[in-house]
Image (cartoon, helix red, strand yellow):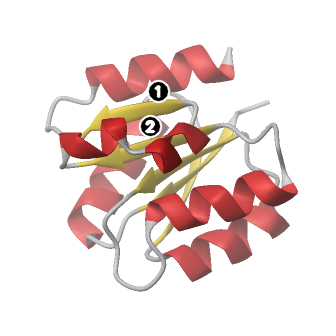
C-alpha cells in the first residue's frame, strides 16, 4: 500500500512541484495551501507524513507542526523553508527533519524515504 503524504505550501507552483516529485517516487500525495486546511486534512486523512512550509500567511508551519504534535505525538513531520535561520529555532524541533528549499529535491526525497521506511 502506498504511503500517504500531505504537502503544505502557500505557493501554488511549489506545491504542485513537490506533489509531482513525490508522486514520481511512488507516494500518494495530497496538498493544502495553508495551515488551517492542512490541519483539517491531516486529522481526517490518515497521512504517514506531513511536509510543511514554515513561512505561510495566517498560521505558519511551526504552529501547524505544534498542533499536529499535540494530538498525534508520533506524526512524521518535515519542515521545508527557504530560510536556514529556522534550524536553530527551538520550535522547529517539533519536526523530525528540516530541509532548506531548493530546486534539487534529492535531500527532501532522501529524508522522506528515511522517515517512511
Q: Is residue 102 left or right of residue 111?
A: left
Q: Is residue 26 left or right of residue 70?
A: left
Q: Residue furthest bottom?
A: 58
Compared to residue 59, the image places residue 115 above or below, namely above
Quarter holding residue 74: top right
Circle 2 is placed at which residue position?
Answer: 22
- The quarter of the rendered structure image containing the C terminus is top right
Q: Nearer the viewer, residue 101 or 69?
A: 69
Q: Nearer the viewer, residue 28 or 48?
A: 48
In the rendered structure, are the residues bearing label 2 and label 1 in contact, judged by CB atoms less than 8 Å apart?
yes
Whole-percent x, y for residue 67 in the image:
70, 64
Compared to residue 3, the image places residue 54 above or below, namely below
Q: Residues within 10 Å of mark 2 (few under 14, many from 20)?
A: some
Circle 1 is placed at which residue position?
Answer: 25
Q: How many marks?
A: 2
Q: Residue at x 31, y 21 (%)?
A: 107
Instruction: Give the distance between the C-alpha atoms of the residues marked 2 and 1, in whole angstroms.
Output: 5 Å
Q: Residue furthest left?
A: 103
Compared to residue 104, the image places residue 103 above or below, namely below
Q: Residues within 10 Å of mark 1 (few under 14, many from 20)?
A: few
Quarter holding residue 3: top right
Q: Residue at x 35, y 46 (%)?
A: 80
Compared to residue 105, the image places residue 19 above or below, namely below
Whole-percent x, y for residue 81 in the image:
28, 49
Whole-percent x, y for residue 30 in the image:
57, 59
- The quarter of the rendered structure image containing the N terminus is top right
Whole-percent x, y for residue 111 in the image:
46, 21
Determine whether the residue tagged by mark 1 lies in a helix, strand or loop. Answer: loop
Res. 54 mark? none
Determine whether the residue tagged by mark 2 lies in a helix, strand or loop. Answer: helix
Q: Residue at x 33, y 34 (%)?
A: 99
Q: Residue at x 58, y 36 (%)?
A: 27
Amino acid at each position: 500500500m502506498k504511503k500517504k503524504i500531505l504537502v503544505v505550501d502557500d505557493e501554488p507552483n511549489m506545491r504542485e512541484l513537490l506533489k509531482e516529485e513525490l508522486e514520481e517516487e511512488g507516494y500518494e500525495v495530497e496538498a493544502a495551501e495553508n495551515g488551517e486546511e492542512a490541519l483539517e486534512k491531516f486529522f481526517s486523512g490518515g497521512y504517514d507524513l506531513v511536509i510543511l512550509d514554515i513561512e505561510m500567511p495566517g498560521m505558519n508551519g511551526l504552529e501547524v507542526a505544534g498542533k499536529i504534535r499535540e494530538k498525534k505525538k508520533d506524526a512524521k513531520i518535515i519542515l521545508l523553508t527557504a530560510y536556514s535561520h529556522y534550524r536553530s529555532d527551538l520550535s522547529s524541533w517539533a519536526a523530525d527533519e528540516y530541509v532548506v528549499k531548493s530546486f534539487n529535491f534529492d535531500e527532501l526525497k532522501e529524508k522522506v524515504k528515511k522517515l517512511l521506511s
